[in-house]
Image: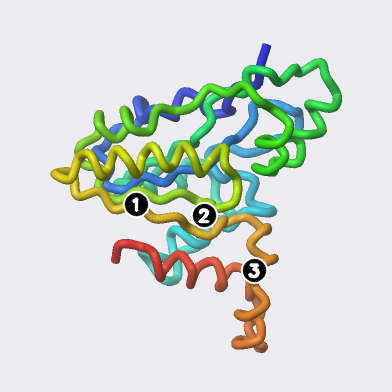
Amino acid sequence: MGCEHKFSEYLNLEKIDFKPTTLIVGTFNPSWPAGNNAEWFYGRTARNYLWDVLPRLYFPNLNLRQQTHLQWKEFCSNNRIALTDIISKINDANEANEEHQEILRTYLDTSIADYFADFQFTNLEQLVNNNPTITNIYLTRQNGVDLFDNRWALLEEYALANPQRNLRLRKLMTPSASARFQIRAYRLANPNDPTPLRNFIFESWRDEWHF
């Protein structure tokens, strides 16, 4: 019973073979419904730009969006970036319930937060404590959903309670197509941009990134 994270074995960073300095935190990637074709975190690339935006922060002409999870993992290893998500399992999701299937099929944070009530969370504070090389932490969504904001607040409290770690926490614009709802000002300022959404997200991330 319940819906586990599709990549649950990666959430606590136990499978990585490098010492991360940067941690990117997402929300949830369900192991069902059928049709979730993600090969790894942020892997539904038809509507997600992370594997375009993130590489460009390091190498201006590098776009991995159409590559496979093998290239994504190699990039993260080379640049000491670890990925995790806030939710590890939705306990009150029932795979036999078609309504639950439909809710999860939207992949919307707001739908998950509004419809379900019983969650298992990744212990982000313990994860950061266990990986003392991590100094920069990013959440790939901004304010607006208490379920995720409250978990992030716990990590902020951890950072304040451990000043010797010099942790830098930032919230980033979602790299998903949902960012289009915030793009109006960018479009007005850049009317000739042929790919406004990808560049809008990139510029937003670049303003918050640690270099």
The residues bearing labels 2 and 3 have C-alpha atoms spaced at a distance of 20 Å
Along the polypeptide, which appears first: circle 2 or circle 3?
2
The residues bearing labels 3 and 1 have C-alpha atoms spaced at a distance of 22 Å
> SS class of the residue under badge 3?
helix
> Which one is nearer the viewer's eye here, 165 or 6?
165
On the image, numbered disc 2 is attached to which residue?
A: 51
**Quarter of image, res 43:** top right
Which residue is located at x 24 percent, y 38 percent?
A: 19
On the image, numbered disc 3 is attached to which residue?
A: 182
Q: With 65 as the anchor, is 32 left or right in this view?
A: right
Q: Position of residue 110 (x, y in %)?
A: 68, 43
**Quarter of image, res 111:** top right
Q: Is residue 102 above or below residue 145?
A: above
**Which quadrant, please, contains the N terminus?**
top right
Along the polypeptide, which appears first: circle 3 or circle 1?
1
Whether residue 78 is visible, yes or no, is: no
**Quarter of image, res 59:** bottom left
Amino acid bearing label 1: Leu
Whether residue 210 is visible, yes or no, is: yes
Amino acid bearing label 3: Gln
For the residues labelled 2 and 3, say whether their Cβ atoms are less than 8 Å apart. Answer: no
The nearer-to-camera label among 2 and 1 is 1
Q: With 202 as the anchor, is 47 left or right in this view?
A: right
> SS class of the residue under badge 2?
helix
On the image, numbered disc 1 is attached to which residue?
A: 169
Q: With 85 as the anchor, is 209 left or right in this view?
A: left
